[in-house]
Amino acid sequence: MRIIQISDTHSKHHLLTDLPPADVVVHCGDITENGTEEEVLDFLNWFITLPYKHKIFVTGNHDLCLWDATGIEDLPENVHFLQDRECEIEGIKFFGLAYNHSEQLIPSEVDVLVSHEPPLMILDESNHIHWGNAPLRNRVFEVKPRFHFLGHAHEAYGTEKLQGIVFSNAALLDNLNQLKYKPKTFIL
């Protein structure tokens, strides 16, 4: 399975042209800049048309109108809004943790954890501040997913492998909200 990971597009998703081929695209939150329903609808209209078999997304700190959502009506079956829920695709278990929600919601068996927040001290530094979440870090090392896809810290774009877990921050914009990085590709 080939997965494309993106994050922190802040309503600039239309700048992402010529995305690489894959089976699944995962967006790790901050789909909007101001958290409005109009921005969410614009994102969803774009996201739904992407040529991927499956599409997964979670909320970020900018996605205010979705913070308390438990679902989104009328999404196609292949679009998965993982707000504290999981889905299984071709035997791979994905779980999406909503922004600022309890890490205890993460199930003990997950292959790919998707969150907006990074774990503390792992791909979390931006503007000389560590934005990571300590309880999330503890839970991730307890559960040990194969991958933890995340975003939020724009200057921390990158990939690290720690204790057998691949951590990937795919925040595509810099701190001035200019498109700077490319989507990440993983093979599972």
Image: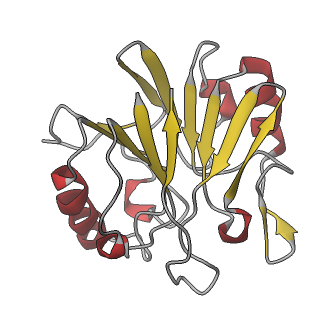
The residue at 56%/49% (across/down) is 99
Quadrant that contains the N terminus: top left
The answer to whether 45 is drawn above or below residue 69 in the figure is below
Quick check: 162 left or right of 31?
right
Quick check: 72 left or right of 110?
left
The answer to whether 179 is drawn above or below residue 76 in the figure is below
Q: How many numbered discs sit on the rendered protein?
A: 0
The answer to whether 158 is drawn above or below residue 75 in the figure is below
Q: How is the image coloured?
A: secondary structure
Q: Is residue 4 visible?
A: yes
Q: Is residue 70 visible?
A: no
> Residue 136 at x, y = what percent?
75, 37
Quick check: 149 left or right of 16?
right
> Residue 43 at x, y = what percent?
28, 63
The residue at 78%/37% (across/down) is 161
The residue at 47%/19% (across/down) is 93
Q: Nearer the viewer, residue 61 or 167?
A: 167
> Residue 102 at x, y = what percent?
65, 36
> Residue 24 at x, y = what percent?
35, 38
The residue at 58%/32% (across/down) is 113
